[in-house]
Image: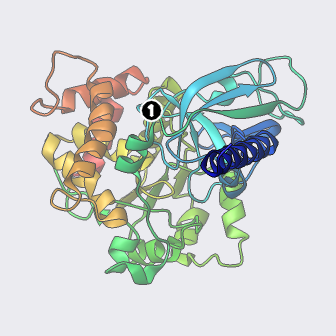
Amino acid sequence: MNKWIKTLLAALLLIGMLSGCNAEKKEDAPEPETPAVPEVRDLATEHESEFGGVYIVITIDDFNDLGFVYGDSVNVEFSNGYKLEDIPYYNGYYVDAGQPLLIAYPGYDYIKAAINYGEDLWDEAELKAANIKTLWMTAELDEHSTASVALNEAGKYRAIQEARDIHYYDEREKYPSDVVFANFRSIRMGSIGENVLFRSASPCDNQHNRASYVNALIEEHRVNAVLDLSDNEKKIEGYLAQPDFASAYWKELYDKGNVLPIALNMNYLSDDFAAKIAQGFIDLSEKEGPYLIHCTEGKDRTGFVCMLVEALCGASYQEIADDYMLTYDNYYQISKTNQADKYQTILESNLDAMLKFVVNDESVDFRKADLAPYARAYLLKTGMTEEQIDAFIARLQ
């Protein structure tokens, strides 16, 4: 065997040995781990009654640390078998009225499963808690209902999350004036008189640091009666006991019986919601003005109720829309000229949906129609009489 052939055989032998080593190393290398699908199981639940829904007892930060991301699709299952499948996980109420979602709203203690502007999910799912004190619970279940959440599809609703994601601040210095910070303004349209009716954030609930500013503004404008859409007597007593309570003028009104708390939830589609509004209007018309209407932020419940009052008093669609969307300019700097796409999305999904519900006639173009008869019909369905409606309108002139 000549020298050249010996050299070639040696080279081939060496290559074979190296290939075997590499193959052996490949066999020994661990397989890459498949990322775990985010999931939580058997968490405690609490009834969140103000807006309607079910708190799932895990903080927003802890939930997100597990790998859940706003815009994901998730499945929620309660221990009684009730399921919500393929619902969006958002940090805001970015679904249409009547649609379910899992929400991590800024300021909430925990994540929450809810039906936006719909039936209280606690009742809908027939959950049960320990120490039941009210009649909203009907199902005979174990005393401690639990919930499990699992990722269904990552990022399925991300485009909607990104399009609608909005935040505001609770620091006064980030706003141009006390009026803007307090989301405070006079409603002057239709037959409503000048400086007779105002709307704002809460003058008593200081969770967003706005109460004292609203208090100063209602004192300045000599507001005499308040329709409080968000609170009941128990919640108000809690505000009064807070060390940072600083709304002396509002308390004078409360002590005189001129604060009317009606504790609306968020379900404007319900008969109970309409009945509470009607009674609030009846009670308010027995007080001297000027008047204030507010909820917590002066945004959602206040937006619906003020829309109804404005329509009842003969305001046009455009006047109502301009007032409704001013809140989004105050809080988020969203206007016709700034973030126009978000402006239009919010207008259509919120105010337009509310007006469609009140008009309740698909053949009517609510943007061009006289809205007063439809607002009146809405209130008549609640049991308000023509005389009571007329007395309320007269108070606002």
Q: Residue at x 51, y 77 (%)?
A: 212
Q: Position of residue 160 (x, y in %)?
A: 39, 41
Q: Residue at x 50, y 62 (%)?
A: 202
In the rendered image, the quadrant that contains the N terminus is: top right
The image quarter in which residue 382 lies: top left
Q: Position of residue 360 (x, y in %)?
A: 28, 19
Q: Residue at x 65, y 47 (%)?
A: 2
Q: Position of residue 100 (x, y in %)?
A: 54, 29
Q: Residue furthest left?
A: 368
- For the question of whether residue 197 can be seen, the reply is no
Q: Residue furthest bottom?
A: 173
Residue 137 horizontal side relative to residue 88, left or right: right
Residue in the foreground of this view, choosing between 50 and 186: 50
Residue 278 horizontal side relative to residue 129, left or right: left
| Image vertical order of residue 42 relative to residue 237, above or below | above
| Image vertical order of residue 214 relative to residue 291, above or below | below
| Image vertical order of residue 371 relative to residue 56, above or below | above
Q: Residue at x 54, y 39 (%)?
A: 72
- For the question of whether residue 292 can be seen, the reply is yes
Colour style of the rendered protein structure? rainbow
Look at mark 1 in the image and give the residue it sits on.
Answer: 268
The number of numbered discs placed on residues in the rendered structure image is 1
Q: Position of residue 192 (x, y in %)?
A: 21, 52
Residue in the foreground of this view, choosing between 142 and 10: 10
Q: Name the element at disc 1.
A: loop
Residue 248 horizontal side relative to residue 93, left or right: right
Q: The disc labelled 1 sits on which kind of residue?
A: Tyr
- Within 10 Å of the Cα at label 1, are there few (<14), some (14-19), or many (20+) other Cα atoms? many
